[in-house]
Structure formats: C-alpha cells, structure tokens
Image (cartoon, helix red, strand yellow):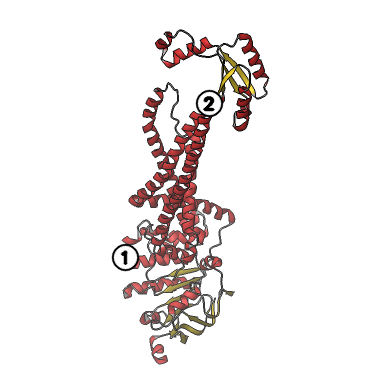
Amino acid sequence: MIELQNVTKRYPGNREALSHLNLTIEQGEMAFLTGPSGAGKSTLLKLIAAIEKPTRGQIFINRKNITRIPNRKIPALRRHMGVVFQDHHLLHDRNVFDNVSLPLQIAGFAQVDINRRVRAALDKVDLLDKESMMPITLSGGEQQRVGIARAVVHKPAILLADEPTGNLDPELSAEIMQLFSDFNQVGVTVLIASHDLDLIMRLQKRIIRLRDGQCIDSQSIQSAQEYEVIN
Amino acid sequence: MAKTRHQQPLKRPNLKTRFRAYVRDHLRVLLFSLGKLYRTPFASIMTLLMIAVALALPTCLYVLLNNLQNVTNQWDDAGQITLFLDSGTSEKQIKSVKQQIANNENVEQVVYVPADIALNDFKQRSGFGDLLEGLPDNPLPPTIVVTPVNSAKKGNTLYELRNSLQKLAHVDQVQLDMQWLQRLQAISKIIQRTIFAIGVMLALSVLLVVGNSIRLDIENRRDEIEVTKLIGATDRFIRRPFLYGGLWFGLLGGVLALLLVFIVLLGIRQPTQELVSLYNSNFKLMLPSFKQSLSLILASILLGLLGSWLAVNRRISKIQPS
C-alpha cells in the first residue's frame, strides 16, 4: 500500500531528515512511527501525503509512483487519504457538521450522501449530538475526535496521523488510539506517528522506530516485555 | 482474533451528482462569501464606500456631459446660414436669389424672412419693443435663411456653401452660426476624453481596493487554505469563495455608487431647473437611464471579479501545506 525505496529527504541548508529509508506498509496494516523528535517521523508522513517531495528515492502509494507527482494531481491523491493532526486544524468559522463534511463537499457528493456519511462518522467518534456546535466550544479531546471524523468521513484507504494524542490526557489518548484501531479493523491502512510508547505498545501493532532519518527497527511487538528485550 | 470486516470504499459520485454538487457548491459559496462581508461589517463598509466613490465620480461627470451633449445636439439646426440682403432689394430680385439658392444641391430649405416680419419677431423676442416703436424706419434688412442638407452641415462643404452664397447678387452679408458650436463640440470632446481618463484611473483604483481586500482575506485564511488543500481540495475549489467575495464587492459597490450618483444628480436638478428657466428653455437634467444604471453595476461586478482574480491568481497555488 505504502512503499518507500531508498528515500532521502534533505531540507535546504539542513542535514538529511531521512536518509536511504526503505519501508513497506501493507494494505490493511496498522503501524506506529516512533523515535525522538527530529528523527524524521513528520517528514515521513509529509512525503506520503505529498506535502513534501523526496530528494532521492521512490515513493509508491497503492502501486502508483508519487515521487514526482505534479501539483494538479495531488488533490486526487489526498482524497484517498485521511490526515489527522496534533492540533486538529479545524475551521473555526463553521460548525462541526460543516467541518466534517468538507472532504465530501470537495469530492462532490450528493447532499443526502453527505448527511448520511457525516452522521455515521460523527456517530463513530461519539459526537453525534454536537454536530451543530462550533469547534471552539468543544473540549480538546472532542476537537480531536472531530478532526478524526473529518479524516475518515470519505472512507479513505489510508489514514495518517501525526501525534494525534499529543495534547490529550492518557485516558483520552487511549480512546483515540482505540478509534484508529477500529478503523484498521475494517480494512483501513493506518500509520500513526507517536512518541507515546506506553500507549502504542499496548495496542500490539507494528512499531517503526526512526533515529536520525533512518529506520533502526521495525517489527510487530506483542508485549512490553518483548520490547524491553529488543532494547 | 475477530474476522476483519472490510468497509466498502465510497464510490466516486457519478458525473450528474458531481455536477449538481458543483452547482450547489457555487450557491453555497455565494451565500458564504456574502456572510463573510456581513461578519466584518466595518471593513466591508469601508471597502464598499471606496469602490462606490471611485465609481460614482466618473459616472456623475459622464451623465452631466451626456446632458451637455443633449443640449448641443438640439442646436444642430444652428448649421443654418443667414443671408442679409441689401435693404432696397425688390421682391422680384429676392425671388430670383431664392431660386438660385434653391438650385444648389447642398441646400435643403430656403426661407425668406421679409424685413417687417423680422422686425416684429425681434420686437417680441428681445423685449426692446417699446424702444423699436420709436424708430422711423425698419433698420433690419430682408433676410433669407438657408438650411444646408445634413451632409453639408460640417466642415469645408459648409464653408464653400457660405462662400458661394456670399458671391450672389444683392447679398450684403452672410452669417454662419457655426464656429461657436464647433468650439463647444471640441471642448466637450476634451471633457469627454478627460472623464474617460479619470474613469480609467478610478477603475484601476477599484481593482486595487478589491484586490487588496481579497489579498488580506487570503493571508488571514492561510491556515484554512492549507488544511483544505490537505484534505484534497483543488485550487479552483479554494479560489471560489474569494472570487465570489470580489463579485459581492463589485455588485454592492456598484449599487452603492448608483445610489450616490442619483443623490448627487437629484441634488443639482433643482438648481439646474432654476437656471434653465431663466433661459426659457425646456431643458431637463436627465438622470442615468435604466441601461446606463445596469451598465454601471455590471462594470462594477466585472471590476470586482477581475480585482479578486488578480489577487487570487497564483497566490492560492503558492500556499502549500507544510
């Protein structure tokens, strides 16, 4: 589903954010990206979402080479993805419903389908009763869930998340991660950057560890003890 | 482990659905961008007033010029040539002169005004009636008024006609009341050009005013644009509300400009009426016609759209999520 071949990303005037990275994430897989800050987690997600382009190497999404994707083709690529941010990036001049419906409006769905899908997504994140509220009146956890509803409302094949629990307390974080896990259960490929090791180990999914732009370890971990052994 | 139940991917809506969604989105954005103006009332009113003043000024001047041209057009029969004959010319001689003039192909009409009728006319019109009563003789000569054909009313043909009339026997003096009209027309042409130039400059300022407002709006919404791009919006989709914003600026600014024009013209209508009544004229200050009003608003809309397009063009595609 997602394949990086020998990918290097160098920012102007800086050191390499990623160097010679090889990585494959299968369809329907759920994986965590972890590592210290500056290890290249965000850069990796940006390359997959075509926010940045690699300096060297090749990137394939669903067997399509997006390494040198022209700008006009990027919108179509992103419509197959859902992206969740740490600071949820909601639009504050419209209510929850309109925020969540945006990807469907962009793709040109009929209003009945939009209504149905938005309510389904809001139901999934347990915010059905808040659809007409403005984002600013919601709590941090609720705003993050609105962001997730927006990322999944169009049933994307790939769900990317950059520190989705970064601002949340442990209990809320666990709920959010459970949500991602649920989406993975219905076949969505999920890739989450997170440094919350305790939390991601409990989910027993593949953990990709980056350091200095390189993948130092990538395997499925069944338990915390196993993780200790590896280290 | 529970068996994975894969979700059905959402089918891309068919062309008809997408087209209807496209139309719906246009309507939604139309209202949304109007709402945006409403939510920042102070800034919106400032911008609209600037547009309105910039458009109202040349429009007022244009309408006034139009009125002036209407008046001078009514004087087109001033292309007449007046022949003053020698005082002692007999009726027979006058008839022969008349005949000679009528034979000229450039002449449309010949009217003979006998001296006594001319005097009566003059008495009535000039207000010097009592004074003229005291004169022993009629000081006015017999007169022939020649109306050239329309094609001969301008330029050299007219002068040639005048010269040929001058050479006729018994003709004392030929008067051509044309020069002052030509001067007036030349002046009005200068005024017309000047108004046009002012109009172009002010239209340019409307472009800049709209462009600047939209540019500021884009800068304020940079985050929003980035997010929308991240969830797969095309540049066109993002551009739309800004272009509609320009359309609203143009439409509302144009309506406001028209309102200003009417206020100004109605304000000077009364004094003009007083002035022309002193000249016994039935001239009436014309307000902009429906067609002119519509043109003003359409021009304003076009300026608004163009201004926002200039602001939006390239700027949207340069904003990329980071």
Classify residue A204 by image quadrant.
bottom left
Badge 1: residue crowd in 10 Å (few <14, some 14–19, many ≥20) = few
Q: Nearer the viewer, residue B184 or B314?
A: B184
- Residue at the image position 37 percent from the left and 46 percent from the top: B49
Q: Quadrant of the C terminus of chain A?
A: bottom left
In the rendered image, the vertical position of residue B286 relative to residue B207, given as above or below: above
Q: Amino acid at mark 2?
A: Asp
Residue A99, position as x, y percentages in the image: 41, 60
Relative side of A133 to A20, left or right: left
Residue B260, position as x, y percentages in the image: 39, 39
The subunit carrying tag 1 is A
Q: Nearer the viewer, residue A5 or A220?
A: A5
State whether residue B3 appears in this view: no
Asked if marks 2 and 1 fall on the same chain, the answer is no
- Checking the image for residue A139, the label placed there is 1
- Identify the residue under disc 2: B177
The subunit carrying tag 2 is B
Rounded to the nearest whole Å, what is the CA distance between mark 2 and mark 1? 87 Å
Residue B316, position as x, y percentages in the image: 47, 62
Q: Quadrant of the N terminus of chain A?
A: bottom right
Q: Amino acid at mark 1?
A: Ser
- Residue at the image position 47 percent from the left and 35 percent from the top: B65
- Residue at the image position 63 percent from the left and 17 percent from the top: B169
Residue A97, position as x, y percentages in the image: 41, 58
In the rendered image, the vertical position of residue A6 relative to residue B45, given as above or below: below
